[in-house]
Image (cartoon, helix red, strand yellow):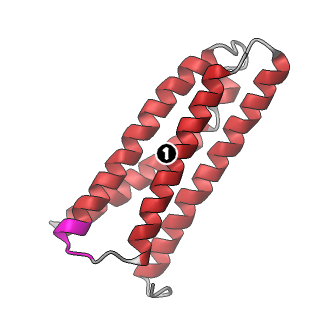
Amino acid sequence: MIETILITHSLLTKLFLGFLVGGLFMPMMTAKNPQSLKKVSLIYTAIFQGIITMIAFAGLVAMVVGEYPMSLTIILMIVIWAVMMYIEIRKHKLVKIANLEHPVTYTLIRGAFVKIGIVQIVLVAAMVVWMVLRAKGVISL
């Protein structure tokens, strides 16, 4: 049973990485209608929060069912989850209050959207690499 939970956690993480990569293209898709970035950002944020919460829940269930102790790795995952939620909420608020009709503002928001997306991808990818190295025995923390 624990294997199924861990596989689910892993698959959700890979789905999330794909979702984040796809999110990098959102500002380009809204270039013709800058105001649509607000609507797209709302939908993106809702899906983002849904997937990342599913990942956290699957991890929590795995920790409880598998009787894993609270380790540095689990604490790191919790911190990354909290940071990513904070970043995403701030990003959505930034897009929501911005005057996207102004071309300079839209360009700045678009750039921030992509840069934040890249930071989020790096955070998740770093955690995936950490877990793979840990599973292979390269890292013992």
Q: Which residues are magenta?
A: 63-68
Measured as percent of width and height from the top left, residue 83 is found at 53, 52
Measured as percent of width and height from the top left, residue 20 is found at 55, 44
Residue 116 located left or right of residue 69: right
| Residue at horizontal 45 percent and vertical 84 percent from the top | 141
Residue type beneath disc 1: Met
Residue 66 among those drawn in magenta: yes
Q: Which element type, helix, strand or loop, lies under badge 1?
A: helix
Measured as percent of width and height from the top left, residue 11 is found at 36, 55
Residue 27 located left or right of residue 126: right
Examine the rendered structure and indicate whether residue 79 appears above or below residue 84. below
Corner quadrant of residue 7? bottom left
Q: Give the residue pinned by disc 1.
A: 85
Measured as percent of width and height from the top left, residue 31 is found at 72, 20
Examine the rendered structure and indicate whether residue 58 appears above or below residue 68. above
| Residue at horizontal 83 percent and vertical 17 percent from the top | 103
Corner quadrant of residue 50? top left
Residue 135 located left or right of residue 24: left
Examine the rendered structure and indicate whether residue 109 appears above or below residue 114. above
Quarter holding the N terminus is: bottom left
